[in-house]
């Protein structure tokens, strides 16, 4: 059971990081194109975030917690708690910043594409930031998510002591 949990955890980490990197590559490879093509590419990014990144993230966190429960000796290891804190920060950041920004950008691009098909001016809500600002926020958020995932992986491989444990025998 523990080995299966470990493989599930590792697979979800790989899927999360790989899908996030793939979305970054898709966004970086944009060339000037028609609004309809741009909307189609944004739709693939939004679908990847919704159908691949979020489920992988949730499986990653759940399997990580179950691994700690399945291996009681890990509960005392400080690197495990540091990794858990990074993992929860990553989850909160993705759920509260990256995913909503991805949805906002896709909705804005869809509105621009629809307006261009109808030969009208692009609809713009005065309270919304420009599309370029939203796209930059999304890209930065995905880079931060990748850095947090890499930090969690580094903690799992390196396993630092993170402070001194007090030994009851030596005071």
Image: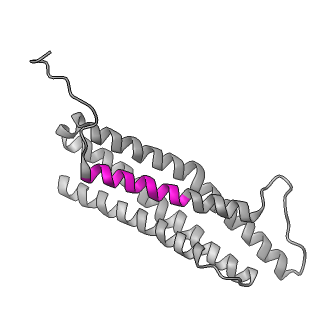
Q: Residue at x 72, y 60 (%)?
A: 133
- The residue drawn where x is 62% and y is 77% is 41
> For the view shown, which residue lies furthest in the right direction?
120
Who's the residue at 29% across and 60% down the image? 10
Q: Quadrant of residue 131?
A: bottom right
- What x and y, as percent, mark residue 37? 69, 83
Q: Quadrant of the N terminus?
A: bottom left
The quarter holding residue 80 reads top left
Q: Can you see residue 118? A: yes
Secondary structure predominantly adopted by residues drawn in magenta: helix
Would residue 98 appear left or right of 123 to someone viewing this image? Answer: left
Farthest residue, direction left? 169
Q: Is residue 10 left or right of residue 139?
A: left
Which contiguous range is marked in magenta?
A: 142-157
In-front residue for pair 93/2: 93
Q: Is residue 121 above or below residue 143?
A: below
Toward the viewer: 31 or 122?
Answer: 31
Q: Where residue 56 appears, x then y in whole percent?
A: 42, 60
**Quarter placement of the C terminus:** top left
Task: Answer above or below: position of 132 versus 171.
Answer: below
User: How did the renderer colour the structure?
Assistant: one colour
């Amino acid at each position: 059971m523990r080995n299966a949990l470990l493989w599930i955890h590792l697979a979800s980490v790989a899927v999360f990081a790989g899908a996030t990197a793939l979305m970054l590559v898709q966004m970086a490879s944009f060339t000037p194109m028609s609004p309809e093509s741009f909307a189609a590419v944004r739709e693939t990014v939004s679908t990847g975030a919704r159908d691949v990144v979020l489920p992988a993230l949730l499986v990653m966190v759940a399997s990580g917690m179950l691994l700690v429960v399945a291996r009681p000796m890990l509960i005392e290891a400080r690197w495990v708690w540091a990794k858990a804190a990074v993992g929860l920060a990553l989850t909160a950041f993705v759920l509260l910043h990256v995913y909503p920004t991805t949805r906002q950008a896709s909705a804005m691009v869809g509105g621009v594409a629809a307006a261009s098909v109808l030969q009208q001016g692009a609809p713009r809500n005065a309270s919304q930031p420009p599309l370029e600002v939203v796209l930059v926020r999304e890209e930065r958020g995905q880079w931060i998510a990748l850095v947090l995932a890499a930090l969690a992986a580094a903690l799992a491989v390196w396993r630092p002591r993170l402070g001194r444990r007090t030994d009851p025998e030596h005071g």
